[in-house]
Amino acid sequence: MRPGRKNGIKPDGWKIELELGNKQDLLEIGKQKQIRKPMDFVLSKNDKTDPPHNTQKIIAESLGMSTGKVAQAELVRTKAPGVWELVKAGEETVGGAYQKIKKEEKVAKRKEEIEEQKKVIEKEELQKPNGLFDVIVIDPPWNYGREYDPEASRVASPYPEMSQEELLKIELPAKNDCVLFLWTTHKFIWDAKELMDKWGFIYKACLVWDKEKMGMGAWLRMQCEFCLIGIKGKPFWNNTTYRDIITEARREHSRKPESFYKMVEEITVGRKLDYFSREIRKGWEVFGNDTNKF
């Protein structure tokens, strides 16, 4: 292995470190250039003999790198000195370190948002749905108990979760004749059935959503999500077309397929509620603490 390399990664960190050490001097040059008296020089927009001073560009050209890479290096060097030491040692690339920091910032921001949502829920500031509904779609925030990670842990909820005990306390605003569409995953199928029983609905069918892309999974790589269908009383139902499977590519976490809502709208009638919704939808009433997410 060539000197100055570790694990085949070229340690650009030390070269950048040395150049950034000269940054203050370069900034001072630029400052002095800006405060020169007008009599010292006359420069028109088309005069290229004295181009504008650009410290980052000068450093990048000296290193033979892009200004973008230099900017990333400065961010890592400033915000994560420990990570920057790994870059200098050749154990991490500038780009890799930058991506890690941006990911951590994203996770931290989302965790902060989740905490704010929890405060709203605890204060009961959400306005409950008014009246009763003929059709209810509910996507419970199942208690996975995993840290939110936008890349490695896609099954972790990017929103406040609820325990089964908390979900069982929910009183659905259902009419005596009502259709329930209850979304769940492999892990919570039995919990979903328990909820349906508790809410007074009779299980009728299970709709399978094929997301077209392989997901996470310890025993099997998961690609499907499920929606239990139950009824109370004798609700309107008119279906001779739709099958027990929907095939549509997944989108953002927890966002359900458009074809599902189209199906519900065509085979049911009456007042519709999307419970724990994260999206405003025409013709539907929504309830949740993140209804403008999508």
Image: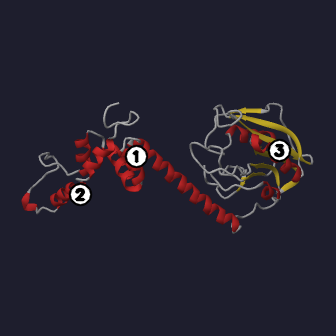
Q: Is residue 113 left or right of residue 79?
A: right
Q: Nearer the viewer, residue 205 or 148?
A: 148
Asked whether residue 131 is in view, the answer is yes
Q: Secondary structure at mark 2?
A: helix
Mark 1 lies on residue = 86
In the rendering, at what x and y percent does residue 210 appear?
70, 33
Q: Amino acid at mark 3?
A: Trp
The answer to which of marks 3 and 2 sits earlier in the sequence is: 2
In the rendering, at what x and y percent does residue 134 appear?
83, 51
Q: Quadrant of residue 227?
A: top right
Mark 2 lies on residue = 24
Q: Quadrant of residue 37?
A: bottom left
Task: Name the residue rendered at 86%, 40% in the picture.
Answer: 237
Mark 2 neighbour density, 10 Å: few (under 14) some (14–19) many (20 or more): few
Task: Name the residue rendered at 10%, 61% in the picture.
Answer: 38
Q: Is residue 185 left or right of residue 13?
A: right
Mark 3 lies on residue = 190
Task: Name the residue rendered at 32%, 46% in the picture.
Answer: 70
Residue lying farthest to the right in this orientation: 233
